[in-house]
Image (cartoon, rainbow, N blue to C red):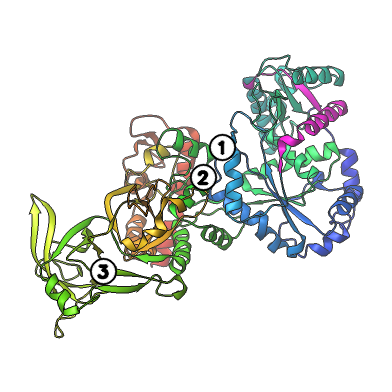
Amino acid sequence: CLRVTLNTHKAQAKTMTAKDNKPAAAAETTVTSNALAARELEWAVNPPCLLEEHRKANGSIIRTRFPPEPNGYLHIGHAKSMDFNFSLAFEKLGVAPENRRTIFRYDDTNPEAETEEYIDSLRRDLEWLGWTPECTTHSSDNFQALYDLAVQLIKKGLAYVCDMTKDDMVAQRNLAKRRSNARHVGKDPDAEAPLDPALLPGRNRDTSAERNLRLFENMRMGMYDEGTYTLRLKMDFESANPNMYDLVAYRIKYVPHPHAGKGWCIYPAYDWTHGICDSLERIDYSCCTLEFETRREPYYWILWALDMYRPNVYEMSRLNIEYTVLSKSWLIKLVDNNHVRGWDDPRMPTISGLRRRGYTKDILNNFCNDLGATRAENLIEIEKLYHTARLNLGATSRRAMAALDPIKVTITNFEEEKAKAGDGGMTFEVQNSPTDESLGSHTVTLTSTIYIDSSDFRLVDSSVYYGLAPNKAVGIKYHGGNLFCDEVVKDGDKIVELKCHIDNSEGRKKPKSFITWVASDAIPCEVRVYGHIFTVKEPTDRWEEEISPDSELIHAKALVDPSVREVVDKKYVNKWHSNCALQFERIGYFVVDTDTKFDSESNTGDLVFNRTVSLRDQRKAKAKKSNTEEEERMKIDAMDFFKLAAEFKGKYSQYNEKTGVPTHLADGTELTKSAIKKLAKELDKHRKQQAKYKAANK
């Protein structure tokens, strides 16, 4: 028999009333909403005795968990998960604050990929974001219990030791899928995919409990090589869900564990571990993302087979953001292939990278909370994150003037103007924040030589340009007078100096704009301006070819006003905290980078800033351009879509004659069936959008 029958359990489940399937009384008074209800399974029904036992253990407490695997750094998707498990889930359920508990669990069952560095970073990032768990646990703390439970299943005849190779298992699963597909369309599976006893059920599945107990103990004692044996669960090869095809519960790995040490050479798989740990830790709601929805069956089958309490499981859509990848394997490649400086590179979507770029815990938590949680897949505009950052930083950041690409300006009549102004007349008090007096103030002093940013000067003026140009005046911020450009000094094609004079007369013409500047004693610094790491909104499987060469622009000779000297000292710089954030006036929001070695007393050492976000919301600026591009896109015939659409142009060389879907890449490589299927969906999406557009514009 290929299916483990559940007749006894099903009969019990069918006789249970709706009331029996509810949480116990104390929990009923705690949870006031069923907002986290999801797909029901008979295996998920808790018998009354387990419900009562859980009620006695938890009382009025409702418990969730946050269980990341320490095989990399946490990213912004994990920040959303933390926001949900520590806060939003309880809000949706209507749980009072005093009854909320969340466990922070290291899902550490894969020692080959886990390191002390990752373990430490997970803890630090969670603390930095401000979440306080009820306790911190490790799946590895339960290794003995997990082993003992596996022995129980072997004794029940629900687990067996298997000597199939990886290729054999793949062939076995493929045969089971073919049989399932045949049943799904009403065909005879024995005719469409005849059983091969060597594969299905295979030579191991129906062996005795005594044999399997002996082999499993030998695995535990280190008597076999890696890859020779696994422990598998005797599940259901007739299921439509491939995750029920006798999953591997244990495999042999001769690798020391970073937390548990050298005591184990067999390690439990994820599917075996996480549901059991949820039950052992008295979790009420086990929340995950939708890619785990098909793991619901094995999750509950395992707990049913062990007669353990079954928590509620809720799946939500994972976070997808424009110009970003959150796949752990892709992030590892970005680091390992030196596309970025490391896990905390400001272009990375890791929490460490975002912190280094200047995103505070309030920015990230507010962003995640505003997104909420649904089961609908969507792509979040990166500008939403930028907008949240601007709202936060605009209210909390100290202002300072800076020049990223400075041009020297010599004020030829400075001494004359200084004499007119009198003592202290060229020094001005400036509020650190125009909206928050509590942030204090600083002074700026105009000197005979100042520096302006190159973006504020052009050799050729125009009616729509408000900056400085030859024989043209602009206002000098905080001084108030006009700066008139008399002469441009060049070295070849490079502008090296502007000679200007100040016009502070009463009848002077009012300038169109006032530009920022820094004095002659400005602090040299390096400014790194970051953009999207990818050139496309949704990176594809060829993502390494889609990395932007302009994602990091370095201004190595920038200057910043000396008023910030004290707050940017290296003694305040810490990679695990938010560092000093500044608004460079008229430029953007910046943060002191962890590469900073600046000593404010000696005025020596490197001072490095990262741009967090520009001052301007780019969505409005792009709206008009976007509308024009959309109009042109809707004119593209479906047969020419992959030839003419901007994101596909030049990528393919051959196309299906009937559909227009690409079949070969530009270099002649034949596309896989899955890639062609994905492109066909993209074309269908274009046709639907085109039809809507035409209907709306009749």
Nearer mark to the viewer, of 1 and 3: 3
Magenta span covers which residues? Answer: 137-166
Whole-angstrom CA distance, mark 2 to mark 3, is: 47 Å
In this orientation, does residue 207 appear? no
Residue 657: image quadrant is: top left
- Checking the image for residue 445, the label placed there is 3
The tag earlier along the polypeptide, 1 or 3, is 1
Q: Whole-percent x and y of residue 113?
A: 58, 31
Where is mark 2, residue-wise? 326
How many residues crowd mark 3 within 10 Å: few (<14), some (14–19), many (20+)?
many
Q: Label 2 vs label 1: CA separation?
A: 19 Å
Within 10 Å of disc 2 (Cα), the crowding (few <14, some 14-19, many 20+) is some
State the separation of the CA atoms marked 1 and 3. Answer: 47 Å
Picture quarter with the N terminus: top right
Q: Quadrant of residue 447?
A: bottom left
Q: Is residue 130 above or below residue 299?
A: below
Q: Is residue 149 magenta?
A: yes
Q: Position of residue 652 (x, y in %)?
A: 35, 37
Is 235 in front, or is 265?
265
Asked if residue 16 lies left or right of residue 518, the reply is right
Which is nearer the N-term, disc 2 or disc 1?
1
Q: Is residue 371 magenta?
A: no
Q: Any mark on residue 20, and which?
A: none
Residue for badge 1: 117
